[in-house]
Image (tube, rainbow, N blue to C red):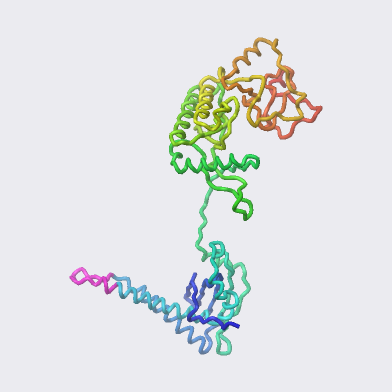
């Protein structure tokens, strides 16, 4: 069996050591990945020889500290040609040594009755282990009160309570940083892991190139993991765009021409900045620009791929593809009437109409009234892509069909009509335009 540790030769790191005006002392040390918090109350250690030892050691600490407080006058004189700074530095070092020696003597005295407990809870073999930062912060802590009894100093282990734990928590080098910044959580699509990798990589590169000073683009704030598994992520955090609205919803002649023209110019400028740094956007379309509450334009979604009608499949994830998509966005902004459309077939890559409602699909009537025909002609576009809903967007996500026989828009996104579940099989649903004329 190993012998108890010797406090005089014990290697320990002092986390905190203080004495108060009532001559009570508290010492917290870190030994081999374990913390020990020792309390010496005058009322419990003042008896007999033990009390005399404590008083003498504490007095030495107080005197050394008092000398240090008094020795704050400059070591030079204005009427002297002799530089005594070297002597002053020597005095300060000597004073520090005296104060350190006095402190160590009292600390070792306080640790002496814990010798066996230290050997039990913090054996020397633990010192050979590599300590992680998490282990250092969450090291086990043992609490003791010192008492003088039968001419000997004893350490009485205390049951840890909230007050004692609060004392230790105050010693940890941490501060709370108030952070009221909101972040946007973008979840990983398990079916498209490469898109997530591409977006994270591109956002990181944009930051490295210092482009946030030139364009409005969400910053990558952090990765979101689940549990303790650091090898997988469930999503990532980005800058929150204040009250974002997809640019698609701004492709409307009712939006002021000046705003639309400014956005058209901005879309091209943003792409030029990216391309100058060798960065390809990827999925160039109006949905991937956002307008914030101040009418400022943000570029989003760097997951790549493409959307048919906006970018030629042969130009996927290329600068030429970016230019093609941005040109169509700019045209639609300059003249929404001539450059938004409603062809018969939807070919959006990844889009889908809500299954189970196929019986509701409206049939085009080539002999419909000239006014309706004119509207559809105005909506023909270079994008060659069928648009639906109030938002004039292609099919995507869950959609519901209008039962109006002459409904021009035919299909509507759930979110645009405030719907969470499709109507039952025998229930009719009408858009607001058809509702007024049925």
Residue 133: where, in percent of width, then height? 53, 62
| Residue farthest right in this picture | 426
Q: In what quadrant of the picture does the C terminus appear? A: top right
Question: Principal SS element in the magenta part?
Answer: loop
Q: Quadrant of residue 418?
A: top right
Is residue 384 depicted above or below 53 in this figure?
above
Is residue 362 depicted above or below 77 in this figure?
above
Q: In what quadrant of the picture does the N terminus appear? A: bottom right
Q: Is residue 386 left or right of residue 54?
A: right
Residue 286: where, in percent of width, then height? 56, 28
Q: Is residue 345 left or right of residue 152?
A: right
Residue 106: where, in percent of width, then height? 47, 80
Question: Across the whole image, how many numbered discs are drawn on residues?
Answer: 0
Residue 119: where, in percent of width, then height? 57, 78
Give the residue drawn at x 57%, y 66%: 166
Say which of 62 and 100 sits in front: 100
What span is colored magenta in the figure?
74-88
Q: Quadrant of residue 59?
A: bottom left
Give the residue drawn at x 63%, y 73%: 159
329 inside magenta stretch: no
Give the residue drawn at x 20%, y 72%: 82
């Amino acid at each position: 069996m190993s012998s108890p540790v010797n406090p005089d030769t014990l290697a320990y790191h002092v986390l905190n050591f203080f004495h108060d005006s009532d001559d009570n002392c508290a010492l917290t040390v870190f030994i081999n990945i374990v913390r020990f918090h020792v309390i010496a109350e005058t009322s419990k250690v003042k008896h007999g020889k033990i009390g005399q030892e404590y008083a003498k050691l504490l007095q030495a600490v107080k005197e050394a500290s008092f000398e240090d407080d008094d020795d704050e006058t400059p070591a030079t004189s204005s009427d002297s040609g002799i530089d005594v700074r070297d002597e002053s530095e020597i005095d300060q070092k000597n004073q520090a040594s005296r104060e350190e020696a006095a402190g160590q003597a009292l600390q070792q005295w306080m640790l002496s009755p814990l010798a066996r407990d230290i050997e039990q809870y913090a054996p020397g073999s633990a010192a050979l282990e590599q300590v992680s930062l998490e282990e250092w912060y969450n090291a086990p802590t043992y609490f003791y009160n010192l008492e003088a009894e039968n001419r000997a100093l004893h350490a009485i282990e205390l049951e840890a309570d909230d007050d004692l734990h609060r004392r230790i928590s105050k010693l940890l080098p941490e501060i709370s940083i108030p952070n009221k910044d909101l972040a946007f959580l973008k979840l990983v699509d398990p079916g498209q892991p490469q898109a997530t990798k591409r977006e994270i990589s591109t956002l990181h590169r944009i930051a490295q190139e210092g482009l946030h000073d030139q364009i409005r683009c969400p910053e990558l704030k952090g990765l979101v993991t689940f549990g303790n598994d650091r090898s997988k992520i469930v999503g990532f955090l980005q800058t929150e765009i204040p009250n974002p609205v997809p640019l698609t919803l701004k492709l409307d002649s009712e939006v002021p021409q000046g705003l639309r023209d400014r956005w058209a110019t901005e879309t091209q400028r943003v792409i030029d900045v990216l391309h100058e740094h060798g960065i390809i956007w990827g999925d160039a379309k109006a949905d991937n620009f956002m307008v914030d509450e101040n009418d400022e334009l943000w570029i989003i979604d760097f997951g790549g791929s493409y959307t048919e009608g906006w970018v030629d499949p042969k130009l996927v994830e290329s600068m030429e593809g970016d230019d093609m998509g941005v040109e169509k966005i700019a045209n639609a902004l300059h003249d929404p009437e001539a450059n938004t459309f409603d062809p018969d077939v939807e070919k959006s890559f990844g889009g889908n109409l809500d299954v189970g409602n196929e019986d509701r699909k409206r049939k085009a009537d080539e002999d419909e009234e000239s006014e309706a025909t004119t509207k559809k002609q105005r909506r023909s576009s270079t994008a060659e892509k069928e648009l639906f809903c109030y938002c004039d967007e292609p099919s995507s996500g869950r959609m519901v069909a209008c039962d109006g026989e002459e409904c021009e828009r035919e299909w509507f996104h759930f979110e645009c009509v405030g719907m969470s579940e499709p109507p039952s099989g025998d229930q009719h649903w009408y858009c607001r335009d058809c509702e007024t004329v049925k």
